[in-house]
Amino acid sequence: MRTLLVILVKELLQLRRDPKILPILFIAPVFQLLILGYAATTDIRNVELAVCDLDRSASSRQLVQRFEASSYFRVTARVDSQAGLDALLQGGVARLGLTIPAGFGADRASGRPGTVQLLADGADAMTGTAGMSYANGVLRGESGEGVRPLVELQPIVLYNPDLTSRNYMVPSVLAMIIMIMTMMLTAMAVVRESEVGTMEQLLVTPLTPTHLIIGKLIPYALVGLAEVFSTLPIVLFWFKVPLRGSLLTLLLLTLPFMLCTLGLGLLISTLSNTQQQAMMLTAFVFIMPQIYLSGFAFPIQNMPEVFQLVTYLVPLRYYVVILRGVFLKGVGVGVLWPQALALVVLGTAILALARLRFRRRLG
């Protein structure tokens, strides 16, 4: 333990003496969380709508006003022909195009259902799909006045009643920041020892590979926990994401996730000869696939089956579930133990593989 303590003190002193590393450790995550917290949202508002009103009746104007009154749409242009509408969609000025044909008002006045055409820009699939859904809601409201439905639906949304995407995206951004910082710093710290020649000096001491590995990992685990504490106020008080669960549970279940990320960082260091190689390998081979396959950006259930199986090997997948469970659902270890167990198993396997490669590299 005394030998291990010496390595820990040496690593912490090395961190403190590097004037460039402290801003990266504690200031950069805050800025990343602020920027990505606003950028990573699936809420669709102010969809650009172009209108081609060929009827010019009171009913057609009333319909357009219903779209304008909705917070989901913003009428950006009005044209007199279908060709003009197509040009706006092609140029990206509008995401949706609404065509109200001649005779729409007469049909509505006679009690017949009016027909309109809605065009969506499929190049932006998310905005187009959401815009079509919102527009259908506006049109149903227009045609359904005074008509009582056979079945009255009363939906209740649990855990995130307003369906605010930021409430479930911001915790995922926090997970991504912890993963990037702990993995990359660990990989580069070990490679830096080899680059500057201090690894050879450590090898002539009575240190064992286990001492070196633990001494390298624990300081960055402490850095990871410090980043949780430094960014948590941003999540809670700036973005106002509710923390319905226990802070102790959050910290406890963060440890097995960092076991995975630190192990991956050590594994990357055994595959790299320079810090530049370590950075590129971390970013493109280990970080990007985890973001894509974790459910952070794309629903796992929509992926092909082979990729769904691959996601079980992605630590970020389990930690995203843990964070959303603790923050939004207020659940504890009793519910989240399968994810925690998966992280422990993955972390142990990754660390064992990294230790084996580390010993071979030292040999």
Image (cartoon, helix red, strand yellow):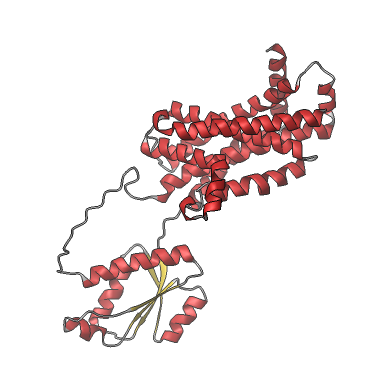
Residue 78 or residue 360, whichever sits in front: 360
Please indicate, yes or no, whether residue 30 appears anywhere in the rendered image.
no
| Residue shown at 19% from the left, 81% from the top | 112
Residue located at (45% from left, 31% from top): 337
* Quarter the C terminus occupies: top right
- In the displayed structure image, the side of residue 218 where residue 110 appears, left or right: left
Residue 319 at what x, y percent from top left?
A: 50, 38
Q: Is residue 265 above or below residue 277?
A: above
x, y (%) of residue 141?
24, 68
Q: Confirm whether residue 96 shows in the render.
A: yes
Q: Position of residue 17 (x, y in %)?
A: 72, 28
Residue 34 to residue 23: above or below: below
* The quarter of the displayed image where residue 344 is located: top right
**Which residue occupies 48% across, 35% down?**
339
Q: Is residue 353 left or right of residue 248?
A: right
* Quadrant hosting residue 32: top right
Q: Tell whether 221 sits left or right of 197.
A: left
Q: Nearer the viewer, residue 252 or 33?
A: 252
- Compared with 96, 153 (above or below) is above
User: Which quadrant holds residue 128?
Assistant: bottom left
